[in-house]
Image: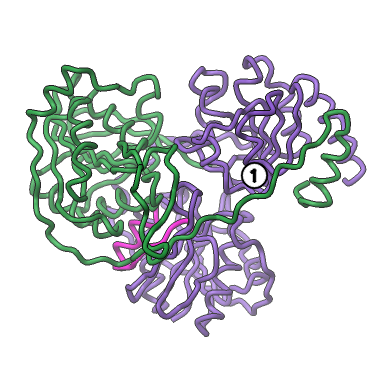
Chain colours: A purple, B green
Amino acid sequence: MSVLVYIESEEGKFKKASYEVASYAKAVAEKMGTSVTAITFNAGDVAELGNYGVDKILNVNNDKLKNFNAEAYSDAVKQAAEKEGTKVVILSQSANSKYLAPLLAVQLEAGYASNVVALPESTDPFTVKRTAFTNKAFNFTKISTDVKVIGLSKNAYGLKEAQADTAVEEFSPNLSDKDFSVNVESVDKATDKVTIADAEIVVSGGRGLKGPENWGMIEEMADILGAATACSKPVSDMGWRPHSEHVGQTGKPVASNLYIAIGISGAIQHLAGINAAKTKVVINNDPEAPFFKAADYGIVGDAFEVVPKLNEKLKEFKEKNA
Amino acid sequence: MKILVCISHVPDTTSKINFTEGDTKFDTNGVQFVINPNDEFGLTRAMWFKEKQGASVDVINVGGAETEPTLRKALAIGADSAIRVNTPATDGYQVAKELAKVVKDGAYDLVIAGRESIDYNGGMVPGMLAQLIEANFVNNCISLEVEGEKAKAIREIDGGKESLTASLPLVIGGQKGLVEESDLRIPNMRGIMQARKKPLNVVEPAETSVKTEAVKFEKPAPKGDVKLVDPENLDELIDLLHNEAKAI
């Protein structure tokens, strides 16, 4: 009966988003009067999950699952759900979880709601609030199947500590050759940089910066704040910055705590992709730029003058508050 | 190689989003509909397979007759024929199920869909379809090549990318990167004329069961005005970010 949560790890370690889905799973379980079981893959120290209300951990240790593999992971989660008699499976909305979730939903004959932003409005009928129209609206989705799969948007619920007496169990799902028919040949990932997906703060530059040679101050700000760097679509289209930094409707979504837009006018496609960021700051010399309507804080000024000064101030602030 | 490209019929990004009937229905009044951007990257990549490797390219939509202009646009871009499954698209599973039947009956080798539509943002149809027809699946695909039965794909992951190989049949959840923005094609007059004569087959739905239902919509609360900070007083911004927004 327990609520099952799929906990992602990287190099055996959990991320903040892992504790967020665990916290959410705990609250859903309480609503339903049941416990929380987590499934982890090749995770090192799993004890920390006990601080977020996880009652039981099914830890899969299998070298074949070192790299994420949607089909195989989905198969394993499905078997865990069946073993636990789970009615609700919860996962994050990372690239990997979004890859896995629809496969799992079909395997469990479950209804799946993605981009969920709150606890279920009711559990009978099971209704959840999710974003739609690329953050321009919410919809309440009723899931009518016996088993449900819920994808929780990043930063939508937060971390809630809850002590649990956690039991850890090794779990060995039966995996078939079919599970490995998509082969990972190589993974190319910068390990020294904060990713847009994980970042608490994203610093983003647009066409107003005039050329790729001017990104030093953006990177400096990101360094000071421990932020990820991003850019607008024209900037990536012109090749000033890599495509992987493009945020917006056809690029990466941003759901960080803070988004700082520098020299970005705020085209509707851009705003659609970053609307889920909690606090938005814009620095632009054009007071008519549409971004000022979407932002919480704004500075009308020349980025080339404002940003270096702001970087100095941020450095001082960080030193004082270290 | 037989390719099927899934086309979602979605409101143009600049559309005003409103709801009617007590916030239970999307208000299509005055809304311009377009090919879902993520699907358009896939369609354009399919055109490359057609032109360079002799693939056939069909496009499909699950929806009412109002989606036909969007399918005609895909034909004008260069698809060979179009299929419309004549039923409203109400949830991802139902759409995937309808697509699965067409893919099986048509023996398609490669299905290219967008990673998500920009209206409901479900992000579930490509994966569900792959699972239903037991095909391989690559999501967030930013590069795709096919030689014989073997496909090489690159998938965007959080913080990087991953190179994958898989055999056909294959389902792709595609996005920008499959082709660049500058590769997208605007239909020319000849394409539009030809599109009128290309087949658009309407097929009746196989099954209409749904697992989820959007019961109600809500618009975000209106945002307060931006707080402007004097560029000569950056301490104020830092103070606001620290004490008010608690963001640094």
The image quarter in which residue B19 lies? bottom left
Name the residue that disc number 1 marks: A199
Residue at left offset 39%, top offset 54%: A100
What segment carries the magenta color?
Answer: A100-115
Residue A113 in percent (x, y) is at: 41, 61
Residue at left offset 38%, top offset 53%: B122
* Count of numbered circles in the view: 1
Quick one: which residue is furthest to the right in this view? A320
A243 in the magenta segment: no
Residue at left offset 78%, top offset 52%: B246
Q: Amino acid at mark 1?
A: Ala
Q: Which image quarter is the N terminus of chain B in?
A: top left
Using the image, determine if residue B39 lies above or below residue A239.
below
Using the image, determine if residue B70 lies above or below residue B52.
below
Residue A41 in sight here: no
Residue B41 in percent (x, y) is at: 33, 31
Judging from the image, what secondary structure is the residue with disc 1 in?
loop
* Residue toward you, A53 or B58: B58
